[in-house]
Image (cartoon, helix red, strand yellow):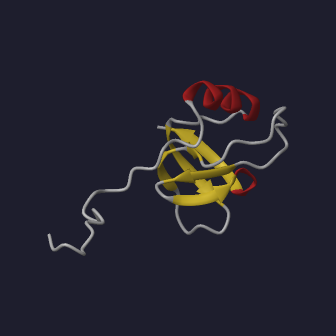
């Protein structure tokens, strides 16, 4: 590598850290009645097809937990609100 060049390591894959630790995820999943961290099929409003993959919590909700607060979720990289979910099935 030349003296004034920097290796940006662009060849290394991106692996984001989980939004919340597993203990909090389980507590949030129970409060909202969602299968967070599990493989699911989800139907979302305005989506042309059902999504399959692990239901991920993108951001922790405010504490104390309020099950009426919308959660930011994702399946297979598709981000949506818990209010946009029409149905889900654990696979």
Front-lying residue, 65 or 82? 65
**Residue under the point 51% across and 42% down:** 40
Q: Residue furthest front?
A: 3
What residue is shown at x 75% (from left), y 42% (from top)? 61
Q: What residue lies at 37% left-to-right and 56% top-to-bottom?
A: 14
Q: Which of the 4 image quarters holds residue 12?
A: bottom left
Q: How many marks?
A: 0
Q: Is residue 70 positioned above or below 24 on the image? A: below
Would you say 15 lies left or right of 17 here?
left
In the picture, measured across the screen, residue 8 lies left or right of residue 63, that is left
Residue 43 coordinates in the image, percent (x, y): 60, 55
| Residue 88 location, quadrant | top right
Q: Nearer the viewer, residue 69 or 91?
A: 69
**Relative image position of residue 57 (x, y in whole percent):** 61, 44
Q: Name the residue at the left extreme.
A: 1
| Quadrant of the snapshot with the N terminus | bottom left
Find residue 76 and report its horizontal and vertical position in percent: 46, 55
Q: Where is residue 39? Give x, y as percent.
A: 47, 39
């Amino acid at each position: 590598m030349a003296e004034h060049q920097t290796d940006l390591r662009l060849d290394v894959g991106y692996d984001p850290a989980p939004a919340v630790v597993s203990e909090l995820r389980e507590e949030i999943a129970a409060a909202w009645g969602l299968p967070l961290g599990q493989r699911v099929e989800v139907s979302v409003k305005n989506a042309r097809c059902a999504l399959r993959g692990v239901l991920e919590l993108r951001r922790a909700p405010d504490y104390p937990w309020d099950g009426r607060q919308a959660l930011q979720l994702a399946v297979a990289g598709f981000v949506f609100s818990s209010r946009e979910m029409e149905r889900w099935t654990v696979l």
